[in-house]
Amino acid sequence: AQSVSQHNHHVILSEAASLELGCNYSYGGTVNLFWYVQYPGQHLQLLLKYFSGDPLVKGIKGFEAEFIKSKFSFNLRKPSVQWSDTAEYFCAVIPTGGGNKLTFGTGTQLKVEL
Amino acid sequence: SQTIHQWPATLVQPVGSPLSLECTVEGTSNPNLYWYRQAAGRGLQLLFYSVGIGQISSEVPQNLSASRPQDRQFILSSKKLLLSDSGFYLCAWSVPQLGSPLHFGNGTRLTVT
């Protein structure tokens, strides 16, 4: 079955540490890729997205993600996390021809400690 | 600006009772509308997807149904709730363009007892 996998369910980092959250998908064709973030007590919101072109995508708050087609991956990175990055992060995929229906991964809970 | 309203925020219902969760969007026309269920450790599961009035796509077999009686109104229903229907339900909208970001409501915490 087509799916999106986020293998890190819980990540704990100290401030200023580097972050990389994994995301893999199983669709065989062209895809559109997204990262959403849910800060405590807030709505889910879009962090960044990839449609085509440069596989390195930059989003808000210093986040970036790299699309590696050969690995079916779209990992999220940030060079130096802050306490305010504590949130749950969701990878999501729209396969081409799938309308605008997002399939989300299971999410990664990130806790940044001071 | 566009806003999305979802209610109620919390709901406790006995097994076998009916359900009606409502979602409305303001400030946009002909939006795509979505119902997701969010469960801890399981991410967001798309339940229903609508591209227009009366057009509902059911994504997973389940005890729930959805309706879109008006352009900006999306209703999640059940005739008889099961314990397994407990969860956190999110309504969302997007402009009808591929890759458009989803905008989520505040969600409804449903507990079936």
Image: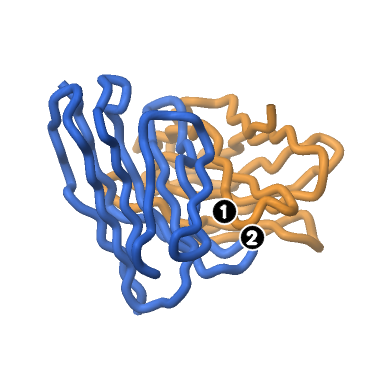
Chain colours: A orange, B blue
Q: Which residue in the structure is indicated by mark 1?
A: A63
From the viewer's perspective, tell me whether residue B27 is left or right of residue A52.
left
Dot 1: within a 10 Å radius of its alpha carbon, few (fewer than 14), some, or many (20 or more) residues? some
Image coordinates of residue B112 in percent, x first then y, are 19, 25
* Observer-nearest of B35 and B78: B78
- Vertical arrangement, residue A100 with respect to residue A83, above or below: below
Mark linked to residue B13:
none
Q: Is residue B4 above or below residue A36?
A: below
Chain of the residue under label 1: A
Q: Tags 2 and 1 in contact by the CB under 8 Å rule?
A: yes
Q: Regarding mark 2 in the picture, which secondary structure is present there?
A: strand
Q: Is residue B25 left or right of residue B53?
A: left
In the picture of the structure, the residue carrying the numbered disc 2 is A58
Residue situated in front as seen by the camera: A67 or B95: B95
Are the residues under badges 2 and 1 in a single subunit?
Answer: yes
Give the residue type that dot 2 points to. Lys
- Subunit under mark 2: A
Q: Residue at x 26, y 20 (%)?
A: B83
Task: Tell me the quadrant of the picture where the N terminus of chain B can be found.
Answer: bottom left
Residue B5: which quarter of the image? bottom left
Q: CA distance from mark 2 to mark 1?
A: 6 Å
Q: Secondary structure at mark 1?
A: loop
Residue for point 33% across, 67% down: B25
